[in-house]
Amino acid sequence: MGLNATSMQAVTWGGYPLQVNVSTLPIPQILDPTDVIVKVSLSAISGADIHTYNGAYEEKEVPWVMGHEALGIIVEVGNSVTSFSVGDKVVVPDQASNGLEDLSTAELMGLGLGLDSYLTTGCQAEYVRVPFANDNLFPIPQATDEAPSKSTLANPDLDYLLASSIFATGWGALDLAGYQPGDSVAVFGAGPIGLMAVYSAMLRGASRVFLVDGDRRRLSVAEGLGAMPIDLTHSDPITKILRQESDGVLRSVDCVGTEAAHQLQLRDDKVLENMTAITKIGGGIGRVGTFKATGDALSTSPWHFLFPTFQSGAIDSTLVAPQLIEMISQGKAKPSFIVSSIISVDEAPQFYERASQHLETKVVIKFSSA
C-alpha cells in the first residue's frame, strides 16, 4: 500500500535540556523484509522522555525522535511479515528488538542514536518503522457486540496504549517483589509507574496498599483507587505504615526514580532504608528501573538475607503486555484513568514542560492523521 504523503510531523530532541521541537521529517520506508510501517494514532510522553528532556543523557548524535509508546494502524508490510497485515491495529511496545541486543528505547537514546534510528525507535511521530514486526507488535482485539469496550474514556485505544509501557512496568514491579494475591504492599513514588503499581496491586487482590510520596494531587488519585496515601512531607512513612501493619508489609516496591528522588530531597539509599524498615522479614522488595546497586551488588548486600525476594531492574513489557491487553479487552482493566491530557503534536513542547514540572500524570499525543 503506497502512502500519498512524503513527510510527517514528529517530536524531536536536539540535545538541549528543557527543549523539544516539532519537526517535519521524511516518512519512514520499508528497509528490511521483516519491517512494517505503522501510521500512529496515539503516542505518549513517558518518564524516559522526561529524563531526556531534563538533560539526563549525554549529548551525542542528535536530533532523534522522542517516544517509545505508540498505537496505530499498519499501512505497509515487508515480504517476510507473516503475523500482521495492512489495516491491523497494533500496539508498539517500549522494547522493540532492533538487532542491538534488544536494548530498551531509553538505552538506545542513551547511546545517542540519531535520525538514522528514528525509523525504528521514535514513536512520537505520524509514522514509525517497526523492525522484526512478527515479534515486536501486539495486536489489539477487535471489539465485538458480545464484549463491548467499557472504557470510561471516549477512546478505548488509550487503555491499550498504556499496556505497552507504564501499565506493564507497574504490573511487573510487583513481580520483582515476589507479589502474591492477598499480600500487603507499600509503593514508594506516585508518578505514573507508581500509580500503575498501586492499580495493579488492587487488580491483583492486595489486602492493603500504601503509597508514599510528597505530591498531594497524585496521592489523591491513589486514594481514589483504594490505597492509603502517605504524604512524606508531613508524616514519617515508617511510623505510619507500622501502625497499620505491625510486622511490616509483605511487599515493598520502589517506583520513585532517580530524578524524583532528588526532587523529593531523598537519596536512593534513603528510599531503600525506608523499604527495609517497613517490609516484613521474609517478604520481598522490588526496585523498578536502573540503579547503581544491581546484580551481584544486591545479592551480596545484607538485605538479601533478610528478604529472599530482592530484585531490581527494568521490566520487559513484551512478557507482560499480552496479558494486560487481554484484560483490557475483557473490561477487567482500564488504566487510561491516569491520562491527564490528550494533546496535538503541536502542543508537545508545552506539555513536556508541564510533565517535567509534575503538573500532568500522563500526557497522550493524538495525531491529526488518525
Image: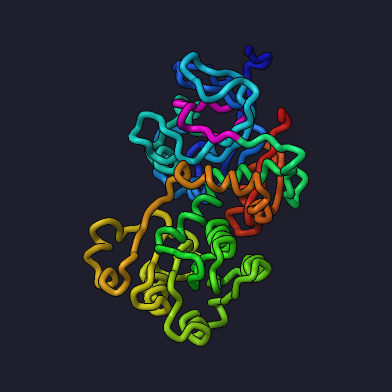
Residue at the image position 68 percent from the left and 50 percent from the top: 331
Q: Looking at the image, is 159 positioned above or below residue 193? A: above
Residue 123: x and y in percent read 56, 35
Q: Looking at the image, is 260 positioned above or below residue 27? A: below
Residue at the image position 55 percent from the left and 21 percent from the top: 28
Residue 131: x and y in percent read 46, 26
On the rendered structure, is 337 left or right of 35?
Answer: right
Q: Looking at the image, is 259 positioned above or below residue 165? A: below
Q: Is residue 225 magenta?
A: no
Image quarter for residue 252? Answer: bottom left
Q: Is residue 77 visible?
A: yes
Q: Looking at the image, is 138 positioned above or below residue 225? A: above
Q: Is residue 11 visible?
A: no
On the rendered structure, is 11 left or right of 367?
Answer: left
Viewport quadrant of the C terminus: top right
On the rendered structure, is 250 left or right of 293?
Answer: right
Residue 22: x and y in percent read 63, 34
What colour scheme does the image use?
Answer: rainbow
Start-end of magenta stretch: 122-139
Q: Residue at the front extreme?
A: 146
On the rendered structure, is 206 left or right of 98?
Answer: right
Towards the viewer: 35 or 216: 35
Viewport quadrant of the N terminus: top right
How many numbered marks appear?
0
Residue at the image position 62 percent from the left and 51 percent from the top: 353
Q: Is residue 136 magenta?
A: yes
Residue 277: x and y in percent read 39, 79
